[in-house]
Image (tube, rainbow, N blue to C red):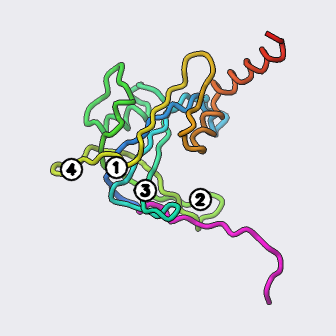
Amino acid sequence: MCSLILTETKKKSDPTPRGLHQVVCYGVIDIGTQKSANPAHPDKRKVLLLFELPHETKVFDGKEERRVMSRSLAISMNEKATLFKFLSGWLGEKPKTGFDLRSLIGKNGQANVVHSPSKSDPSTIYANLDSVVALAKGMQAVAPSRETITFTIPPGGPIDIPSYMPEWIADKIQESAEFKARVGAAAAVKMGGE
C-alpha cells in the first residue's frame, strides 16, 4: 500500500573516513564567546579552524571538491587548554606567547579523524577532527584550493560579518555574546534617539 502522506526524508551524508588524513588549514575564524552546552561550565571565547583534506573529495553542486572539516577550540594558551595541546601536537613545539593563529593559514598536517554515533540516532555517524600532527617526513605540503578566510571580532564597534562568510559560520558569530551585546546596544541607542 502506498502512503499518500508526504514526509521529508533526510539525506544522510557519508562521513569522512576515519583515520589519518593530510589536511591544510584554509580558515581561522574568531567566533566570539559561545554559550557552553553544559550550564556548569563557563562560556568561552572560541576560534574555528577550517581544514581541507586534499586526498578526500566529494561532489558539491555537481562539482568535485576537496572535503572540508572544522574544529572549534576555546582560545586559551594555558598549558592544560585543549588549544595549547592541539597546537603543540601540530607544530611539534609549544606555541609561544603572542602566537598569531592566523599564521596557521596554509599550514599542512595530518589529522586524526574519529567516528562517533549521534546520541539521538545511533545510525547517524559523525566524523570529528580529533587532533593534528605535523606531516610525516617526505610528505609534500599542498596549498588550499579554496579562498582562505580569516576573521576577528573587533574589540569595539559594530561586528560586520563579510558577505563571503559561509552562512553556518556567520550564524555562529551571531550567537556570540559579543554580537548579541553590540546588537542590543545599537538597538538601545536607536530606541533612545541618539
Tag 1 residue:
23
Q: Position of residue 26 (x, y in %)?
A: 40, 42
Q: Marks 4 and 3, Cα distance to the nearest angstrom?
A: 18 Å
Callout 4 crowding tier (Cα within 10 Å): few <14, some 14–19, many ≥20: few
Q: Which residue is mark 2?
A: 118
Which mark sits nearer the N-terminus, 2 or 4? Answer: 2
Residue type at tag 1: Val
Residue 13 highlighted magenta (yes or no): yes
Q: In the image, is residue 120 above or below residue 25?
A: below
Tell me where residue 153 appears, x and y as whole percent.
54, 25
Q: CA distance from mark 2 to mark 4?
A: 35 Å
Q: CA distance from mark 2 to mark 1?
A: 24 Å
Residue under the image location 34 percent in, 49 percent down: 23
**Residue position for label 4:** 140
Tag 4: residue type? Gln
In front: mark 2 or mark 1? Answer: 1
Q: Secondary structure at mark 3?
A: strand
Residue 58, which numbered label?
Answer: none
Vertical order, 1 against 67 (above or below): below
Measure the alpha-carbon separation of dots 3 and 2.
21 Å
- Separation of disc 3 and disc 1 at Cα? 10 Å
Element carrying mark 4 = loop
Q: Main secondary structure of the magenta part?
A: loop
User: In the image, is 111 to the left or to the right of 183?
Assistant: left
Mark found first going from the N terminus, 3 or 1: 1
Q: Which residues are magenta?
A: 1-17
Q: Name the residue tied to disc 3.
A: 67
Question: Which quadrant of the figure has residue 19?
Answer: bottom left
Callout 3 crowding tier (Cα within 10 Å): few <14, some 14–19, many ≥20: some
